[in-house]
Amino acid sequence: MARFFTAWGINPATLRASNPRLPLFLARRFWDVAQEHSGDPAIGLELARQPDPVQLQGLAYLMQLMPDRFSALQQLLYFWPLVAAHIDQRMEVQGDCARIVLLPHRGYYPAWPEVDYWMSRQLWHLRSAPGLSSPVREVRLRRPAPDDPEAWHHVVRAPLTFAASRDEMVLDLAALQAPRGEGSKAIREALEQSLIEYSEQTGTGSELERACAEILHGLAENPTQEAVALRLHLTSRTLHRALQREGWSFTALVEEHRRLLAQDLLLQADLSIGQIADRLGFDEQSSFIRAFRRWHGTTPGTYRVERP
């Protein structure tokens, strides 16, 4: 387990802290490291089967108390930043269907196993209402088709498309709006208030999370520790100590954000290598190529061609 936390880049004490929140890049690293250590491409589906000890901060229970699955999904969308602020999620309603879409946050895509995880959790909720038909019409995933897709088909039990343009579930609107047994209004209101209070307690985030948000926002301008500290109303020394407590330096954070975002940008065929270098804050394309070779042992062009 110690090796896992070291590879993940997080202090285990952080997870024991009150109201912990992880910055976007650490959420991404968790799934990359989990897949590497397990050797299981379906690790997201497997972890979704495990019981959630905190019931997604009470959100899963609140969803069960809603009068129909459509209103339950609305609650999920409203409180989504509490459980996965590093992924943007939205609902699109058109005609007789609704689409739940997972989108990149500031250009940063979630890891494929994490998409599998949230898809599986939401499918479980949508099918958990006794006596009601499944609203799931289709599931579309950005990830390439795995060598053995059986685990995904077993979970989805509906038409499934890999290598799609985006991650989404297509749902039958009438089925979502079908009424079901409504839970206690008093308990529902208490849970909503509890989630609102939790949101207020964690709204500002840690120095690490706020620094990462600033780095990602200004990556193209090659952010410096001094400039980020100023925007956070901290001294450079205070920011340095805060990051050091979490096991990171400012330089390492910039490097990690560049490394992960480079992977996502290379999947966009309309971006040239030079444009990607600019987006990542490199002064020269050659500097980006050298950095990428250090990260992945190959050039950006070769990585783009060989990526499934």
Image: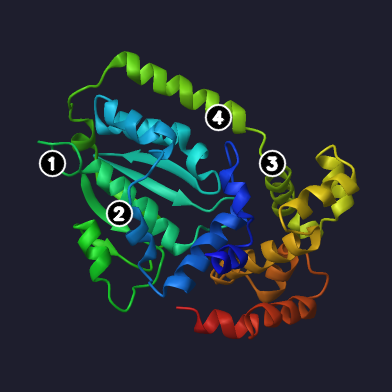
Task: Tell me whether the residue at label 1 lies in contact with that at label 3, contact meaning CB atoms closer than 8 angstroms.
Answer: no
Whichever of labels 1 and 4 marks the residue nearer the N terminus, that label is 1
Whichever of labels 1 and 2 marks the residue nearer the N terminus, that label is 2
* Residue depth check, mark 4 versus mark 2: number of the one nearer the observer: 2
Whichever of labels 4 and 2 marks the residue nearer the N terminus, that label is 2
Residue that badge 1 annotates? 133
Q: CA distance from mark 1 to mark 2?
A: 21 Å
Task: Tell me whether the residue at label 1 lies in contact with that at label 2, contact meaning CB atoms closer than 8 angstroms.
Answer: no
| Relative vertical location of residue 39 with respect to residue 44 in this rendering, above or below | below
The image shows residue 145 at horizontal and vertical percentages of 34, 73
Residue that badge 2 annotates? 49
For mark 1, does the 10 Å Cα neighbourhood hold few (<14), some (14 to 19), or many (20 or more) residues? some
Decide if residue 222 is on the left or right side of residue 192: right
Task: Tell me whether the residue at label 1 lies in contact with that at label 4, contact meaning CB atoms closer than 8 angstroms.
Answer: no
Residue that badge 4 annotates? 199
| Relative vertical location of residue 265 with respect to residue 123 in this rendering, above or below | below
Q: Secondary structure at mark 1?
A: loop
| Residue at figure coordinates x 57%, y 81% from the top left | 303
Q: Which residue type carries mark 3?
A: Ser
Residue that badge 3 annotates? 206
Q: CA distance from mark 4 to mark 2?
A: 26 Å
Q: CA distance from mark 1 to mark 3?
A: 43 Å
